[in-house]
Image (cartoon, helix red, strand yellow):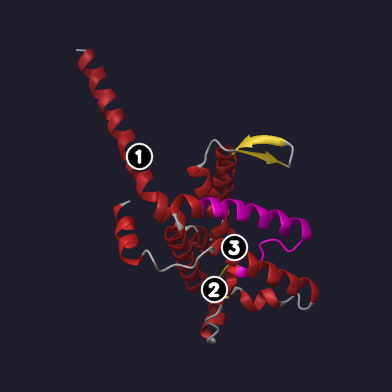
Amino acid sequence: MKWLDKLERRFGRRYIPNLMMVLLCCQAAVWIVMMLLNGGIGAALTLTRAGLAHGQIWRVVTFLFVPPDSSILGFLLGTYLLYFIGTALEHEWGEFRFNLYILASVLGCLAAALVTGSCSNYWLYVSLFLAFAMLYPDMQLLLFFIIPIKVKWLGWMAGVIWLLAFLAGSWAGKAQLVLSMLGFFVFFGPSAVADIKAWIRREQWKRNNRNNWGR
């Protein structure tokens, strides 16, 4: 992607090192506070239009720190999976591009919150898994720690769940689903469009050749 190369050449030294670890450490701190001190702190950190209107600008960042799952098992599994996925993406792309992916996703969530009233970090983190599945489709994970399954099939499952949620959602829900995945669409959308165009050209070439052979 040429535009990414240009951005990296110009701003490549401006990034937060080990961003995934920073996010997970902040999530762990918030989870501990939620469990031990104040269960309602998540509401003060989530991204809402009303909060932003009252000058609570920190929500643009702190919504990333709210654990998607507050149960002990869910938090531990989610943290491990996000660490595994996030560090793999950082290694594959480099830290600047990983930061850029998160930034694009945050801007998408901000737009969703301004349009619909609020936006969680759930689909943003799902988009990280989908990006991981695009880059490492044949890697195997153990589903329920028992069943080996390739990442691409889990990616397809996550994609189908996203599509069903989109089809069944209200207009506000649809906006949140699309905008929360902005990083994924920015990084993988151009290549997907190019693949679709290449497929169309191949099909046209095959059809034209069949017509010529039939004469």
Residue 156 percent coordinates (x, y) = 55, 41
First in sequence: mark 2 vs mark 3: 3
Q: Mark 2 highlights which residue?
A: 61
Q: Is residue 202 left or right of residue 48?
A: left
In the picture as drawn, the residue positioned furthest to the right comes out as 36
Q: Secondary structure at mark 2?
A: helix
Q: Is residue 205 above or below residue 70?
A: above
Q: Going 58% across and 40% down the picture, which residue do you hit?
A: 151
Report the amino acid beneath label 3: Met
Is residue 134 shown left or right of residue 72?
Answer: left
The residue furthest bottom is 54
Q: Which residue is mark 1?
A: 196
Prevailing secondary structure class for the magenta stretch in the rendered image:
helix
Considering the numbered disc 3 on the image, is that residue within a helix, a strand or a loop? helix
The relative height of residue 213 versus residue 35 in the rendered view (above or below) is above
Q: Which residue is mark 3?
A: 21
